[in-house]
Amino acid sequence: MNFNIKTCTICNSKKDLNLFYSYFSKSRNKIRYDSKCKECKKAENRIRVKKYYEEHKAKRLIYAANYREKHKEKIKEDRKRFKKKYIENLQDCYVNEQICRILKVKGFKPPAEITEAYKLNILIKIKLKDGKK
């Protein structure tokens, strides 16, 4: 008998224990495993979260609008800080944003090769700028 196999209560398939979430039961003082496999649990949670969002959508949108209104300065500072991090690390989202700015288009996602080429172009410009100092 193999004790490393468990049956999921949703899909009724036998799976290895590492495909189930585990938790520590204080009352039994041992590690227990969920009755649903990770895959079924995630699917179930997605449905539940989506349903909750649809039921409370108006309330969440009002809350978000009020939060943005009350915390304008904090949001502005956070954006600056994150943008600075993206610029320093030359993350793809920043490079793609620069490509869109040059092409004067919005929402364009350039292919990965173009992003990498432009990233190298920026690095060369930075090195040249540092060399002149």
Image: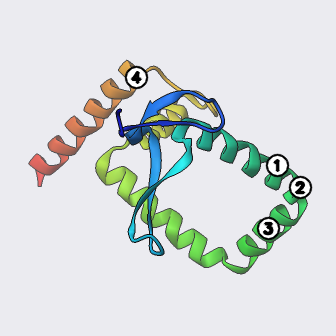
Residue 49 in the image: state x and y as whole percent: 73, 51
Marks counted in the figure total 4
Quadrant of the frame with the C terminus: bottom left
Q: Which mark is residue 65?
A: 3
Q: Amino acid at mark 1?
A: Lys
Q: Answer above or below: position of 119 versus 25.
A: above
5 on left or right of 89: right
What's the distance in space between the residues labelled 3 and 1, CA to CA? 21 Å
- Mark 2 lies on residue: 55
- Mark 1 lies on residue: 51
- Mark 4 lies on residue: 112
Badges 4 and 3: C-beta atoms under 8 Å apart?
A: no
Residue furthest bottom in the image: 70
Q: Which mark is residue 77?
A: none
Tell me which colouring the rendered structure shows: rainbow
The residue at 81%/64% (across/down) is 60
What's the distance in space between the residues labelled 4 and 3, CA to CA? 35 Å
Answer with mark 4 or mark 3, whichever residue precedes in sequence: 3
Q: Quadrant of residue 104?
A: top right
Residue 50 in the image: state x and y as whole percent: 77, 47
Residue 23 in the image: state x and y as whole percent: 45, 60
What's the distance in space between the residues labelled 4 and 2, CA to CA? 39 Å
Compare residues 46 and 36 and report the one nearer the observer: 36
Q: Amino acid at mark 3?
A: Ala
Quadrant of the frame with the N terminus: top left
Q: Answer above or below: position of 48 versus 3.
A: below
Badges 1 and 2: C-beta atoms under 8 Å apart?
A: yes
What's the distance in space between the residues labelled 2 and 3, CA to CA? 18 Å
